[in-house]
């Protein structure tokens, strides 16, 4: 195969991998943003799939031997995975993928080659920092890429699939050149895609975040309720949380202390409901808790525990004076009420809690009335 034909096939291979990586990275942030514990596995799965795609589009160099960029995901893995052990998982996965294209000496050598590259990247990542402000990120990336490509060339030449002299004289130079070129192109395209998606996500979060308290804002509440899928989620509990006598706090201690109270309240709500629901500032001193897939009884237990926790908080003024804080809460749930009435019913329950003594939880339910937790 002449160089021009090789270049055309190389561009097809690199282009297909880049498109795949773009789709994968978009999915990585869009679908798994709220499922952080699965990110490492998803990243490994995407890297293995990219290696498999590259092999499928491989460029034949000799009998049973082809050039492709299957090793590039292993070389770049240190920049996209948190645990170094994931580098080995990616290498092993791509190696096993190679065996799916036929069992022969070249396939076995190819699988072993992936493990060798994985070991090399693992060892290098334990010495060379993946992220270090004292070094240029570009320089570090080039060191990883160059080392990975050299390991690939040396490993292939020593595994004996084809004559060492033939490989070194005819195949290695062009393979190394195009391997480096493909690695650099994919690496920096991924970096730019990663940066772009992170910035979009950051801007989206800023739009949906209350600047004072750091929790979600009313825009998020509106977006959540409008996109809530009743065919997917069978229940939704909504709770209003209102700081009792907040105007008195502002009048007595000043608005700066009032802001501190709101921040403390918001942070406490977010911690108490983490993994169970969403916390948002509705307006002023009112907050809303959203519990998807939570029945009314479960939401009531959570909110009652939240109320009890808040009345034990120690909030101090700059002079060291304790600011007392309690909250009144109102809860309503779907399907006890139609989805478009849940917020109004929760607000009515909040009004009941405030008009019957404050520092309590009231429930809007056409079916039952929940007894206080003793």
Image (cartoon, rainbow, N blue to C red):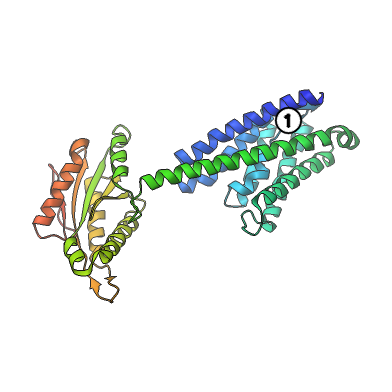
Question: Please, what secondary structure does the residue beneath circle 1 have?
Answer: loop
Q: Answer above or below: position of 148 versus 322.
A: above
Residue in the foreground of this view, choosing between 90 and 259: 259
Is 108 placed left or right of 90 in the picture?
right
Residue in the foreground of this view, choosing between 338 and 116: 338
Q: Which quadrant: the C terminus?
A: bottom left
Name the residue: 65% across, 47% down. Answer: 88
Mark 1 burial class by Cα count in 10 Å: few <14, some 14-19, many 20+? few
Residue 216 lies, in percent from the top left, at 33, 49
State which quadrant residue 54 falls in.
top right
Q: Answer above or below: position of 197 versus 2.
A: below
Is 97 placed left or right of 206 in the picture?
right
State which quadrant residue 246 falls in.
bottom left
Is 103 placed left or right of 79 in the picture?
right
Q: Which quadrant: the N terminus?
A: top right
Reading the image, the residue beneath label 1 is: 103
Residue 262 lies, in percent from the top left, at 27, 60
Name the residue: 43% across, 44% down. Answer: 203
Check the image and name the residue furthest to the left. 356
Name the residue: 24% across, 73% down. Answer: 322
Residue 190 lies, in percent from the top left, at 60, 40
Q: Is residue 250 visible?
A: yes
């Amino acid at each position: 195969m002449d160089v021009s034909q090789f270049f055309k096939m190389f561009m097809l291979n690199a282009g297909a991998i880049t498109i795949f990586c773009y789709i994968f990275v978009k999915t990585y942030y869009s679908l798994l943003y709220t499922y952080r514990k699965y990110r490492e596995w998803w990243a490994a799965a995407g890297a293995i799939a990219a290696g498999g795609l590259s092999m499928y589009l491989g460029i034949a160099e000799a009998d049973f031997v082809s050039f492709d960029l299957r090793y590039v995901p292993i070389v770049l893995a240190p920049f996209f995975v948190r645990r170094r052990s994931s580098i080995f998982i990616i290498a092993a996965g791509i190696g096993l993928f190679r065996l799916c294209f036929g069992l022969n000496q070249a396939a076995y050598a190819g699988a072993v080659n992936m493990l060798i590259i994985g070991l090399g990247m693992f060892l290098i990542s334990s010495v060379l920092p993946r992220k270090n402000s004292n070094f240029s990120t570009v320089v570090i990336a080039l060191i990883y890429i160059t080392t990975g490509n050299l390991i690939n060339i040396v490993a292939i030449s020593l595994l004996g699939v084809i004559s060492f002299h033939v490989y070194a004289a005819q195949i290695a130079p062009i393979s190394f050149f195009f391997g480096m070129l493909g690695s650099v192109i994919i690496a920096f395209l991924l970096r730019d895609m990663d940066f772009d998606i992170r910035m979009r996500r950051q801007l989206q979060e800023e739009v949906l975040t209350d600047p004072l308290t750091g929790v979600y804002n009313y825009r998020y509440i509106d977006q959540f309720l409008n996109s809530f899928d009743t065919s997917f989620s069978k229940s939704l509990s909504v709770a209003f949380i209102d700081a009792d006598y907040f105007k008195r706090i502002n009048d007595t201690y000043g608005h700066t202390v009032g802001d501190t109270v709101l921040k403390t309240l918001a942070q406490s709500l977010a911690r108490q409901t983490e993994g169970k629901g969403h916390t948002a500032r509705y307006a002023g001193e009112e907050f809303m808790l959203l519990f998807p897939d939570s029945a009314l009884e479960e939401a009531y237990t959570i909110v009652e525990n939240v109320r009890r926790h808040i009345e034990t908080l120690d909030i101090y003024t700059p002079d060291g004076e304790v600011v007392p804080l309690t909250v009144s809460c109102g809860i309503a749930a779907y399907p006890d009420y139609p989805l478009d009435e849940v917020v109004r019913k929760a607000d009515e329950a909040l009004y009941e809690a405030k008009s019957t003594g404050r520092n309590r939880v009231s429930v809007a339910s056409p079916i039952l009335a929940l007894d206080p937790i003793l």
